[in-house]
């Protein structure tokens, strides 16, 4: 026990003195969440609601419809800016002040897009059909016989666009920081012959791995609290956080990530290969999971890959702990138990093998 | 000249033997391009599949009119296994409404559509009243959803959109005359007809590849050469410092050129992109940004203590710069304080310029700025480098 205490104290000093690791552990999750938050909310038109910004030019004979159009737009998730001419409209679109432009006269509808928005224009083209139908129906004075009455199953749902992004950003940032920092630290110790020296001491591999892991654990936990507070301050996310479940979920995911980092450092041996593989795996995890988009819009092959990614389950648990989406209690427990068991096993086996492989 | 050739050959061979260099210069950008195209090309396109539960409470009117059945048929026509479907339908009895809500709550279904008991009567009344010109309230179908669930919210929106189609169908059956409009759409800055996601992302990945190579081929190498005294050893030979820097830089730019053609050919021949890879302007501009990123790599290599630190620093600055360059997604509606970083980001200008020069679309920033800003970075890097003593004799 005494040995363990000394070891933890020493590894704490090493951890604090290592500026790169400290930056990765504490600041990168916050920076990642902020950048991703701003970029995604920019595409969505705002941090609160999805809002497509549209510049509108209406011919003089249609000016009387302006107010009706504006109120209809607000309900349908559009934000209209009325301009005086088509040339002004084109300027708005080309300078990306609005995502699209519409010029309306009594006989024609002209839509303007910006080529630099690339694939995003495909989504705007879907909206074009919706706008054409609505305008045509309104202008023809045709009644709507059947209407959809949307009813929320859960009351007091006040979640915003950004609230969907933040848990994903936290999950990816925590996984990245833990896997990369654990994997590179062990690889660095191997290349600097620190592991060889540890091997000739009475300290066991798993105890050494534990002493390194514990500082990644508390710093990740602290960092995730800070990221959550930062998201509340910057984006007013207003989660209904269950702090106990949040702590459980983050802790078990951190243990799994540290375990993965330990195993990667053993399998790939040198630091750069470990770093390369981890980066690639994290990129795949980020894109092929339901972190930023729901399962229902993914192609089948992506859905299948997503089910094999731990981040998918981490996200599910995190969203539950943040009060975003419900989940069966047994499911939450099962995810946590599996994460902790596999992570701990990888740490113990990894720690032992790490020193065993240094026997030559 | 001989010395330059010697340094060029030595460092090129050293990079080709180096797993890290091969990974960051050739493998990572290639895999990233593949993954991105695989992810975003099919996203939302012929892949929408919302799980919808329909509960039909409506009973036919006394005259046997059943609009609810027609509505259900309309939903069936846009559901699987039909082509271009959006929904997978499940029908449940009205008694099971709470079970249906539970399924939505626990993500086993996305929405519940309830056709109310009075639906048929309401539609019939609406049709009659509208025919005699009296205002009426529309018949409603209830869509129960979870606003906090992205899938559920999206499904609710898709049903709203589908209702417009269904209403238009009803309108056409009732012989209403719809006003005709001519519809035009124009894309500002269009250079290529309907560019695919591969067209959009490839120039950005090429720029990102050059930037990453600039950092990861140069900075760690320079840092380790300094750490292990190799620079001192070079300095004690008769070789001039500028011969070393020229040969070293050219070897990196050569690797970056290989990367350019590898990514461009992959985009065209494997991923069916239509970008202009052999455009002389694009190649010349690429060469220009390679020089800029090489200089930034030199700065970082001279700044940090060892190759490990370079790895940490690079991963820390790489991601923000890539996201704020519009490589993966277009950028708009950003707050002014984030825009400061975008406008100062050399990758943003390089990506815009490469998109225009490769024939994807007009650059979002003026071409003179696409040259000026990276040039300013080059100048700043050179000034900074001149203050560092990399080539030391003692």
Image (cartoon, rainbow, N blue to C red):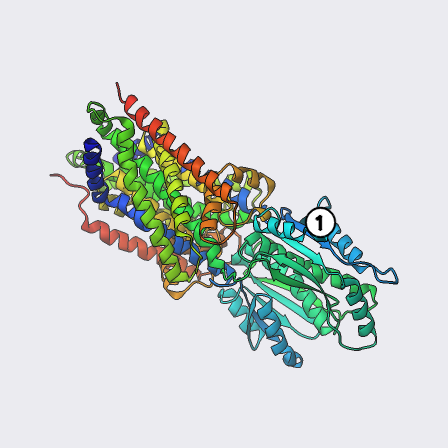
Local secondary structure at mark 1: strand
Residue positioned most to the left? B394
Nearest the eye: A114 or B191: A114
Q: Is residue B94 left or right of residue A223?
A: right
Nearest the eye: A211 or B42: A211
Mark 1 Cα within 10 Å, few/some/many (few <14, many 20+)?
some
Residue positioned most to the top? A360
At 59% from the left and 48% from the top, the residue drawn is A297
Residue positioned most to the front? B95
Q: Quadrant of the C terminus of chain A?
A: top left
Residue A205 at x, y percent in the picture: 28, 27
User: Is residue B84 visible to us here?
Assistant: no
Q: Quadrant of the N terminus of chain A?
A: top left
Q: Is residue A116 left or right of residue B338?
A: right
User: Is residue A247 visible to us here?
Assistant: yes
At 59% from the left and 43% from the top, the residue drawn is A299
Residue B145 at x, y percent in the picture: 60, 56
Nearest the eye: B264 or B67: B67
Q: Check disc 1 and report the residue beneath it.
A: B92
Q: Chain of mark 1?
A: B
């Amino acid at each position: 026990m005494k040995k363990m205490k000394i070891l933890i104290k020493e590894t704490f000093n090493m951890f604090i003195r290592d500026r790169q690791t400290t930056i990765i552990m504490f600041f990168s999750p916050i920076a990642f969440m902020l950048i991703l938050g701003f970029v995604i909310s920019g595409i969505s038109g705002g941090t609160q609601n999805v809002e497509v910004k549209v510049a509108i030019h209406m011919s003089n004979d249609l000016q009387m419809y302006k107010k009706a159009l504006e109120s209809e737009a607000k309900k349908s998730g559009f934000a209209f800016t009325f301009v005086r001419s088509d040339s002004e409209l084109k300027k708005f679109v080309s300078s990306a002040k609005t995502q699209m432009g519409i010029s309306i006269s009594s006989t024609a509808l002209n839509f303007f897009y910006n080529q630099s928005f690339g694939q995003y224009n495909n989504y705007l083209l879907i909206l074009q059909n919706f706008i054409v139908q609505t305008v045509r129906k309104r202008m023809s004075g045709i009644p709507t016989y059947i209407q959809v009455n949307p009813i929320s199953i859960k009351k007091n749902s006040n979640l915003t666009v950004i609230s969907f992004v933040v848990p994903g950003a936290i999950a990816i940032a925590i996984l990245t920081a833990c896997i990369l920092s654990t994997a590179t630290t062990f690889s660095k110790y191997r290349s600097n012959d620190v592991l060889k020296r540890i091997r000739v001491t009475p300290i066991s591999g798993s105890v050494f791995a534990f002493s390194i892991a514990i500082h990644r654990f508390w710093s990740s936990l602290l960092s995730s609290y800070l990221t959550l507070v930062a998201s509340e301050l910057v984006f007013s996310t207003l989660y209904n956080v269950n702090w106990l479940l949040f702590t459980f979920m983050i802790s078990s995911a951190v243990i799994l990530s540290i375990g993965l980092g330990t195993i990667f450092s053993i399998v790939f041996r040198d630091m750069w290969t470990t770093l390369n593989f981890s980066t690639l795996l994290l990129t795949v995890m980020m894109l092929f999971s339901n972190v930023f988009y729901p399962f229902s819009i993914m192609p089948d092959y992506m859905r299948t890959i997503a089910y094999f990614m731990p981040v998918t389950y981490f996200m599910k648990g995190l969203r539950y702990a943040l009060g975003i989406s419900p989940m069966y209690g047994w499911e939450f427990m099962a995810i946590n138990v599996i994460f902790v068991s596999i992570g701990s096993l990888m740490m113990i086996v990894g720690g032992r093998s790490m020193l065993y492989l240094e026997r030559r | 000249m001989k010395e330059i050739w010697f340094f060029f050959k030595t460092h090129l061979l050293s990079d080709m033997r180096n797993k890290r260099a091969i990974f960051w210069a050739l493998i990572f950008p290639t895999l990233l391009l593949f993954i991105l195209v695989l992810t975003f090309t099919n996203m939302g396109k012929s892949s929408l599949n919302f799980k919808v539960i329909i509960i039909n409470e409506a009973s036919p009117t006394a005259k046997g009119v059943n609009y609810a059945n027609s509505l259900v048929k309309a939903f069936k026509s846009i559901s699987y296994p039909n082509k271009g479907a959006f929904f997978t339908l499940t029908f449940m009895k009205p008694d099971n409404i709470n079970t249906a809500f539970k399924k939505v709550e626990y993500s086993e279904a996305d929405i519940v559509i309830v056709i109310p008991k009075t639906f048929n009567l309401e539609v019939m009344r609406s049709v009659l009243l509208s025919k005699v010109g009296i205002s009426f309230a529309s018949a409603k179908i209830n869509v129960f959803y979870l606003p906090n669930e992205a899938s559920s919210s999206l499904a609710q929106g898709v049903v709203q959109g589908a209702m417009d189609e269904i209403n238009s169908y009803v309108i056409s059956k009732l012989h209403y005359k719809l006003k005709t409009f001519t519809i035009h759409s124009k894309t500002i800055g269009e250079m290529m007809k309907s560019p695919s996601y591969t067209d959009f992302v490839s120039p950005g990945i090429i720029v990102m590849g050059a930037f990453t190579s600039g950092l990861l081929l140069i900075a760690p190498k320079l840092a380790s050469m300094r750490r292990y005294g190799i620079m001192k050893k070079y300095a004690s030979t008769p070789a001039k410092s500028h011969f070393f820097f020229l040969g070293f830089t050219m070897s990196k730019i050569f690797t970056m050129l290989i990367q350019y053609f590898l990514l461009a050919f992959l985009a065209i021949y494997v991923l069916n992109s239509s970008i202009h890879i052999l455009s002389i302007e694009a190649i010349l501009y690429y060469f220009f940004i390679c020089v800029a990123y090489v200089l930034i790599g030199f700065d970082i290599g001279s700044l940090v203590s060892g190759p490990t630190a370079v790895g940490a620093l690079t991963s820390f600055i790489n991601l923000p710069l890539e996201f704020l360059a519009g490589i993966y997604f277009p950028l708009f509606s950003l707050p002014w304080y984030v825009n400061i970083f975008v406008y100062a980001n050399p990758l943003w200008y390089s990506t815009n310029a490469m998109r225009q020069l490769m024939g994807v679309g007009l650059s979002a920033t003026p071409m003179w700025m696409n040259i000026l800003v990276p040039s300013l970075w080059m100048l700043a890097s050179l000034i900074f480098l001149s203050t560092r003593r990399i080539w030391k004799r003692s």
